[in-house]
Amino acid sequence: MSRKISHSLINGRAGAGTGGQGLKVEWDSTNDGELHWKDVDESSLEYVAPAFQGTNYGFTAGGNASGTDSNVIDRFAFSSNTTATDWGDMTEGRISIAGHSSSTDGFISGDHNDGAGTFNSIDKFSFSSSAGASDHGDLTRDRETPSGASSATHGFSSTGHGGGSGYTTTIDKFAFSSNTTASSHGDLTYSTYQGVGNSATDYGFASGGCSGCVSTINKFAFASNTTASGHGDLARSGRLQSGQSSTDDGFVAGGLSGSTWSSIDKFSFTSNTTAAGHGDLSSARHQPAGQSSTTDGFASGGTTNINTIDKFAFSSNTTAADHGDLSVARGGGAGSQY
């Protein structure tokens, strides 16, 4: 017996007999009922992580280093505890920005440039080349400290403050494949800035932030342009946190509300409940950049002028461990992963 599998986290790279029609499995009754791929060399199959997560490297772009807006993009390996290496530069020094990830490129949206104001720029840089970033269109409006989320094909930038235009509820959507101005993708239930973003397979999340600090978690569909819905709350109200995402849960690490804290919150993507504590970072900080592998979350840098990269397991509630350093100590940068 064989059954076609049309959606899977397995990709056939060179398997015979797939014909572009998906893969098939067959029941092996002689080996304890094992399932095997049919008409495919199993050595040609590869596990593919969910769109948002990385398997190789984390990237930290921009931030403020000793009072100067940095344009540096750093790359660090998920597998080894070493100092990050310079991976080219953004188009300009930027702080208070959101990070997004496609399967091939990193993106940075929004900007607060000290002395020059707030901007709507989107930058794009390659995960495979350290040549630096290029312009990739614009958001629909200026955004300082937006929340970033990523589907397989698009980046989403929500929350933010646009200088004279104030706080916003608008969610912006931009294509990874084309350099065009973003379009509106519905609204959050509240207006704020300095919030944090998370990404599931089909949904984006925006939480926290201040215009009066909140603990609200909003959930919005990647596929439809509709108003977001409430999805429980963080364990505390705050701002300037970092976001990490496993397959099933969102994590919010660090932050600021009167004082800086080190706590990590965990909330389920599928259930509308208050987040639970999930250990702590190695030190209190706000404005770290967040990165996600398939097994661990990372918080890199932070204010004021922290260079530490922290690593914590998605599966266990324990204090994060030191995972090397950024090449330049800074906070307020954007995280992405490959």
Image: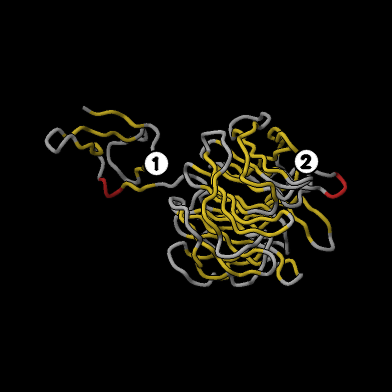
What amino acid is labelled 2 in the image? Answer: Thr
- Spot occupied by residue 98 in the image (x, y as percentages of width and height): 66, 52
Query: Residue at the location (68% across, 30% down)?
Result: 227
98 displayed left or right of 79: right
The residue at the point 69 percent across, 50 percent down is 238
| Number of numbered discs on residues | 2
Q: Residue, x 75% and y 47% (percent of image)?
A: 210
The quarter of the rendered structure image containing the N terminus is top left
Tell me the number on the disc at residue 168.
Answer: 2
Q: Where 13 sits versus 62, above or below?
A: above
Q: Secondary structure at mark 2?
A: strand
In the image, what residue type sits under mark 1? Leu
Q: Is residue 177 visible?
A: no
Please provide percent x and percent y for residue 138. Answer: 73, 47
Name the side, left or right, on which 15 lies relative to 246.
Answer: left
Q: Between marks 1 and 2, how big is the CA–CA gap? A: 36 Å
Percent of width and height locating residue 239: 70, 51
State if disc 2 and disc 1 touch (CB < 8 Å): no
Name of the residue lying farthest toward the left: 30
Crowd class of label 1 (few under 14; some 14 to 19; many from 20; radius 10 Å): few
The residue pinned by badge 1 equals: 9
Foreground residue among 134 and 4: 4
Give how far across and how far down residue 113 sits, in percent.
78, 60
